[in-house]
Amino acid sequence: MDTFTEELVVKKNTSKDTMKLVAYLLGLLAIPAICVLLINVNVYFAIVAICAGFFCIYAAYYLITGMYVEYEYAVTNSNITIDKIIAKRNRKRIISVDIKRFNSLKKLSESNFEGKSYKKIFKASITQDGKDVYGAEMHLDKFGGDCLLLFSPGEKTLEAIRPHLKNTIKIELFKNSIKKSSPKPSENFSAGNSKPVSNKPKNNPVKKTSAESNKPEEHTDKTSKEESKKTKLKKEKSTDEVKKTETDSSAGTSRNGNKSKKKKKK
């Protein structure tokens, strides 16, 4: 199954680019200015000055819009194709090469490409100061020797390139990402133990819903009501028993008094 990824990046203009643009614009303005000065020599120079003015306006627009440059990185299986798009109107093929031909792929800031000589250098990077710029070395028979490709691939393009790179390049290029993804020893091993500690999450108690949490409250309310009723009944029973004992005691005393009176009469 064919795999295809595409990425579009915009080149950042440098101070040198702006200086070139200013120089071109000043040169264009000089053409109609010279024609205006030559009107006194011949009237036909007035017509030439007008035509030159329109030409300069169009040329200035073309130069200013030409400062907007994009690079398109297209990876199809193991082949990478890079095109240069100027002002979204012109497309130019920079390189189309098999990724398996890469002898090295490193960041420009972490390598010494400047100290080497190349038959051909393909420039397709966002910046020229080395930030986020990768350099790919390869040997191309078409150009008769070693060549260098400077480009600024994003994570999407790097992941598409990765399966087709040589193992030595993979290890060197993605070693930082492997270090970040690998867990620390303190996370897997406890102090004084050689066995790894399981990273399984502890079983947290299941939170009860509002409906479930209200159920025990309702049950406690019912039990408290029942207990209060029972206590009331007990109090009522105790008061009844006290009253009975009082009546019995009073009846007993009355009987004893009557008996004593009968004895005295006798």
Image (tube, helix red, strand yellow):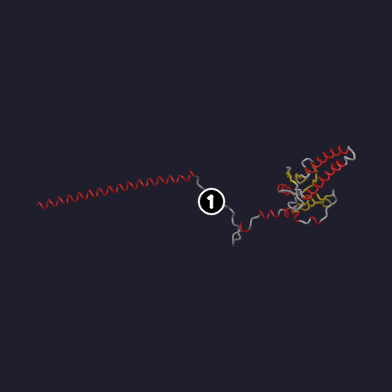
Quadrant including the N terminus: top right
Residue 219 horizontal/vertical position (percent): 42, 45
Residue sitting nearer the eye, 210 or 234: 210
Q: Is residue 212 above or below residue 182?
A: above
Residue 16 horizontal/vertical position (percent): 79, 50
| Residue situated furthest front in the rendering | 40
The residue carrying pointer 1 sits among few (fewer than 14), some (14 to 19) or many (20 or more) residues within 10 Å by Cα, namely few
Residue 117 horizontal/vertical position (percent): 83, 55
Left or right: 115 with respect to 154? right
Residue at 84% in and 43% down: 33
Q: Is residue 121 above or below residue 57?
A: below
Residue sitting nearer the eye, 262 or 64: 64
Residue at 44% in and 46% down: 217
Amino acid type, callout 1? Asn
Residue 101 horizontal/vertical position (percent): 79, 50
Left or right: 253 with respect to 96? left
At mark 1, the secondary structure is: loop
Q: How many marks?
A: 1
| Residue situated furthest bottom in the rendering | 192
User: According to the image, label 1 marks what residue?
Assistant: 204
The quarter of the picture where residue 31 lies is: top right
| Residue situated furthest left in the rendering | 266
Left or right: 192 with respect to 213? right
